[in-house]
Amino acid sequence: MTRYANRETALHIVARYGFIDAAKRLIKDGANISAKDGDKRQPLHRACFEGHTELAELLISNGADVEAKQQSQATPLDEASWKGHIDIVNLLLENGAKTQVTDKDGWSPLYTASRYGHSKIVQRL
């Protein structure tokens, strides 16, 4: 498996930019859905942070862990809550993401959404 800057794999990169067709090809060719970059982020973290709902759905349907924690202990739900991506929050919750988790600073997804003014996410959580 080739690694790039910050130990990212090709799947991390396509997840960050939302390249769904490339992600499908990489997964078909055996890409590691659970690969971690230098900050222990998995491709699902990247898709959720950037707001790529279809890509997040693809990763989840292929076994990505909705509870995966990165170095800061943030989950994909934390990432989506921080950036205000309600569709991804809904997707993660529908796939079993827990809301009662905290990162290394003690922030929950609810606190994060509240802090950054994402009222629809606050109501959902």
Image: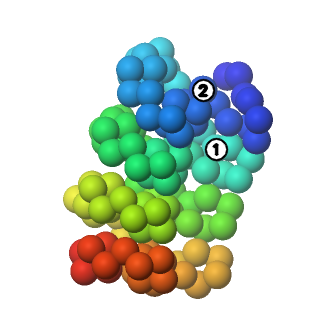
Q: Disc 1 or 2, which lies upstream in sequence?
A: 2
Can residue 64 be seen from the camera position used here? yes
Measured along the vertical axis of the image, is residue 81 above or below residue 105?
above
**Residue at disc 1, secondary structure:** loop
Q: Residue furthest front?
A: 117
Residue 10, numbered label: 2
Residue 36, numbered label: 1
Q: Is residue 125 left or right of residue 21?
A: left
Quarter of the image where the C terminus is located: bottom left
> Quick one: label 2, few (<14), some, or many (20+) residues within 10 Å?
some
Measured along the vertical axis of the image, is residue 28 above or below residue 91?
above
Q: Residue at x 39, y 27 (%)?
A: 20
The x, y position of residue 13, in whole percent, is 58, 33
Whole-angstrom CA distance, mark 1 to mark 2, is 11 Å
Quarter of the image where the N terminus is located: top right
**Residue at disc 2, secondary structure:** helix
- The kind of residue tagged 2 is Ala
Can residue 44 be seen from the camera position used here? no
The x, y position of residue 60, in whole percent, is 35, 43
The x, y position of residue 123, in whole percent, is 25, 80
